């Protein structure tokens, strides 16, 4: 048993995840999964570091502006968690990239990618976690295709997802919660699936999502 596993009381070294987006949410998701000792981690992002986003993307500095976020985050996380196998793709999301990874975590600011992940995971049966933030508001949702409603039923495909005016604290809360939901899944704690977790300023609550056909979960 590793030191991390001994301290935490659980071991996720045999598990893997793909994180789509290496911005405010993605950096928080990735650092918490790596810190918890996940075995393999894939980071996907086509974008580069921008000065306007540094308030909530703390793995980057002003000296990194213009550099590929996925590459930088992978290198810095590898130094933080050398026992985790970390790969990256500095390009757009493609379903095939996530082959071989147990769960996908969405941390993007556009509907097109979220819709694609929602559809791809529905087709493959792969579980995934979605997160979104806007100011002091955010949501996190674990979907297990075939067992829980998808993002459309949860109302997660209605907005852009991540707003530049969101503070670092909101990104930290929702990113950490996305990582927590993934760890729940690894440990078999699937009672958190199908619940939309809502952070609204100083309050966190959950909303049970039903299928579009109103079947019970």
Image (tube, rainbow, N blue to C red):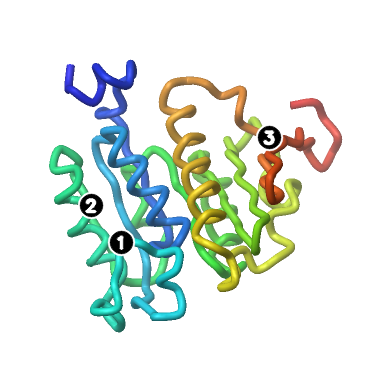
Q: Is residue 112 left or right of residue 70?
A: right
In this rendered view, identify the residue nearer to me: 54 or 99: 54
Residue 213 percent coordinates (x, y): 84, 38
Vertical relation: 174 (above or below) 26:
above
Q: Specify the quadrant of the image occupied by residue 215.
A: top right
Label 2 to label 1: alpha-carbon separation: 9 Å
Name the quadrant of the C terminus: top right
Label 2 to label 3: alpha-carbon separation: 30 Å
**Of helix, strand and loop, which one carries label 1?**
loop
Q: Which residue is mark 3?
A: 195
Q: Earlier in the sequence, mark 2 or mark 1?
A: 1
Mark drawn on residue 77: 2
Q: Is residue 115 left or right of residue 106?
A: right
Q: Residue furthest front?
A: 202
**Of helix, strand and loop, which one carries label 2?**
helix
Q: Is residue 14 left or right of residue 83?
A: right
- Neighbour tally class for label 2: few under 14, some 14-19, many 20 plus, Cα within 10 Å: many
- Residue at the (68%, 34%) spot, across then down: 195
- Residue at the (37%, 51%) spot, across then down: 98
In this rendered view, identify the residue nearer to me: 75 or 8: 8
Q: Which residue is mark 1?
A: 59
């Amino acid at each position: 048993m590793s030191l991390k596993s001994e301290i935490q009381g659980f071991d996720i070294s045999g598990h893997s995840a793909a994180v789509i987006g290496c911005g405010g949410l993605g950096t928080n998701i990735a650092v918490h999964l790596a810190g918890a000792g996940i075995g393999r981690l894939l980071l996907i992002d086509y974008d580069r570091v921008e000065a306007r986003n540094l308030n909530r993307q703390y793995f980057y500095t002003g000296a990194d502006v213009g550099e590929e976020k996925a590459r930088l985050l992978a290198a810095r996380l590898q130094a933080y968690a050398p026992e985790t196998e970390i790969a990256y793709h500095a390009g757009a999301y493609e379903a095939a990239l996530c082959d071989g990874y147990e769960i996908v975590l969405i941390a993007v600011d556009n509907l097109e990618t979220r819709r694609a992940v929602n559809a791809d995971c529905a087709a493959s049966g792969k579980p995934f976690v979605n997160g979104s933030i806007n100011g002091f508001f955010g949501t996190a949702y674990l979907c297990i295709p075939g067992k829980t409603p998808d993002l459309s039923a949860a109302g997660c495909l209605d907005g852009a997802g991540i707003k530049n005016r969101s503070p670092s604290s909101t990104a930290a809360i929702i990113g950490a919660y996305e990582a927590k939901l993934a760890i729940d899944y690894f440990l078999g704690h699937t009672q958190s699936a199908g619940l939309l977790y809502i952070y609204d300023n100083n309050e966190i609550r959950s909303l049970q999502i039903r299928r579009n056909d109103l079947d019970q979960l």
